[in-house]
Image (cartoon, rainbow, N blue to C red):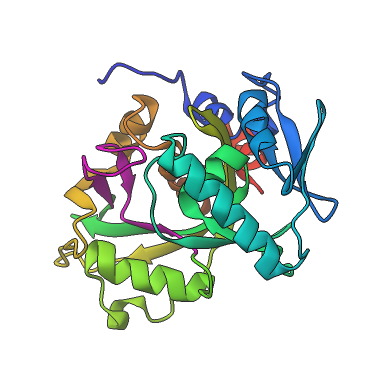
Amino acid sequence: MKTRLFADLAAFARAACTHASHLDREVPLAPFYVREQPVGWLRPSFAELLRRWPHHFEVTSSFVALRANPDTVHGRTTAMAEVTAALERDGVIRGWRNELVSVSNHYAAPELLRVERAATRHFGMMAYGAHLNGFTRRHGEPFLWIARRAASKSVDPDRLDNLVGGRIACGYTVDETIRKEAWEEAGIPESLMRGVGCAGAVRVEYSVPEGLHREVIFTHDLWLPEDFRPQNQDGEVARLYCLTIPETIEAILAGEFTLDAGAVTVDALLRNAVLAPEDPLYLELVRLLKP
């Protein structure tokens, strides 16, 4: 048995979902407002950096607010682009993606602005993603296809991940995202994706060196044919494994999974009755993972 970083799945979920676990914050955080709506949480040290742009931000000891001129979606996006580009040049923001994500006070609400994906953790903004659990059966037993992230990834390199997962970029729906990522990350053709719909959502939140990672992940399950072998297409996956359910759980408890992917996997085990309602941890896991 692998050395466990987490005592059980509930301990793992409490680390991945600090918003629901009642764990104390590692650092104090200041709310970040756009048009009087809280859309992020900033570390005080990062908030202080924003004083360089008094024409864009109101920075106080208790909050930071974006005061773009003009106060429109385009104006706010332009102001944030100026700031984040400067912070990237200074080495504060790393792993630049050249990929804009939409920011609003909740998913599918009117867009407030767009921002470079690499900056979302620094501003503590809620991100949105779509992941897919790739199940299969071997000798009548359920297995899970698991991906190992490439060592070149800027976030969580070389960690275990769901078979398919990606951030929802501007202009994409959840359904469009999961189908695009299914092909790019695992070579899953559209013919196998027919009938796959969103099965639910989980929310993760935890401290990272950049600030705060907050994400709602729309989850999907796909039972793949036993003879199907996923093939990565975009170079972001180093290796693919087909693991038994006990092997998958042990890898989660050993800390080998990203917190995001581990949470999505635990949610799938609940939904597919691998973990039964009679399990003493069942209701605690459901409570921790829900958005």
Of all residues, the one furthest to the right in this rendering is 36
Q: Position of residue 27 (x, y in %)?
A: 64, 19
User: Which residue is drawn at the image coordinates 39% and 18% (left, top)?
Assistant: 5
* Residue 54 visible from this viewpoint: yes
Q: Quadrant of residue 204?
A: top right
- Horizontal arrangement in the rendering, residue 142 relative to residue 267 (left or right): left
132, above or below 225, in the image: above
All told, the count of numbered labels is 0
Task: Please give left or right for residue 58 compared with residue 160 in the image.
Answer: right
Q: Nearer the viewer, residue 134 or 99?
A: 99
In the image, what residue occupies the spot 73% across and 41% down?
54
Q: Is residue 241 above or below residue 172?
A: above
The N terminus lies in quadrant: top left
Would you say 75 lies left or right of 219 here? right
**Picture coordinates of residue 62, whole percent (x, y):** 82, 28
- Who's the residue at 32% across and 68% down the image? 182
Q: Quadrant of residue 255?
A: top left
> Residue 167 location in percent, x, y?
46, 58
Q: Is residue 275 visible?
A: no
Q: Is residue 154 magenta?
A: yes
What residue is rendered at 35% in x and 36% in y?
257
Q: Nearer the viewer, residue 55 or 31?
A: 55
- Which contiguous range is marked in magenta? 144-168
Does 80 sit left or right of 239 as displayed? right
Question: x, y (%) of residue 76?
Answer: 68, 60
